[in-house]
Image: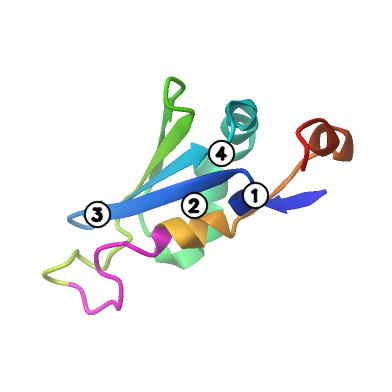
Amino acid sequence: MKIELLKLAHARSGDKGDTANVGVIALKDEFYPLLVREVTAEKVKEHFGAIVKGDVERFELPNLGALNFLLHESLGGGGTLSLMTDAQGKTFSTALLRMKIDIPKTEAKELGL
């Protein structure tokens, strides 16, 4: 079954130059392994498509139940150079929470989803 990350996590985002930074935090400890397994750098890059022109890096923060993503070359040069509406990447967290992942129905049921 497909499920939006919104059901599993909350997120925050910001920027540093031309790189957007998105933190994804599991709503429950038991959701974190699912995030680690399904929310890969490759899938995040695919989700954002042409918005992210550079690489996507993922960092795992198990003690926080979180993942942190750096989306390189995604802000049109950054806050002082970009003509983008969101040159600081503040809406990237909401956009990432709209990403859908596939999980088996049995696993979804076990997790109470």
Closer mark to the observer between disc 3 and disc 1: 1
Q: Earlier in the sequence, mark 4 or mark 2?
A: 4
Residue for badge 3: 15
Q: Tell me if residue 91 is in the magenta stretch.
A: yes
Which residue lies at the image location 65% right of the left edge and 49% below the top edge? 7
The image shows residue 79 at horizontal and vertical percentages of 17, 67
Q: Are marks 3 and 1 in contact (CB under 8 Å)?
A: no
Check the image and report above or below for 105 versus 82: above
Q: Earlier in the sequence, mark 2 or mark 1?
A: 1
Highlighted range, magenta: 82-92
The reply, left or right, for residue 96 in relation to residue 4 is: left
Report the amino acid beneath label 2.
Lys
Which residue lies at the image location 44% right of the left edge and 49% below the top edge? 11
State the separation of the CA atoms marked 1 and 4.
Answer: 8 Å
- Secondary structure at badge 3 equals strand
How many residues crowd mark 2 within 10 Å: few (<14), some (14–19), many (20+)?
many
How many residues crowd mark 3 within 10 Å: few (<14), some (14–19), many (20+)?
many
Q: Earlier in the sequence, mark 3 or mark 1?
A: 1
Numbered-mark total: 4
The reply, left or right, for residue 105 in relation to residue 15 is: right
Residue for badge 4: 27
Q: Earlier in the sequence, mark 1 or mark 4?
A: 1
Closer mark to the observer between disc 2 and disc 1: 1
Closer mark to the observer between disc 4 and disc 2: 4
- Secondary structure at badge 2 equals helix
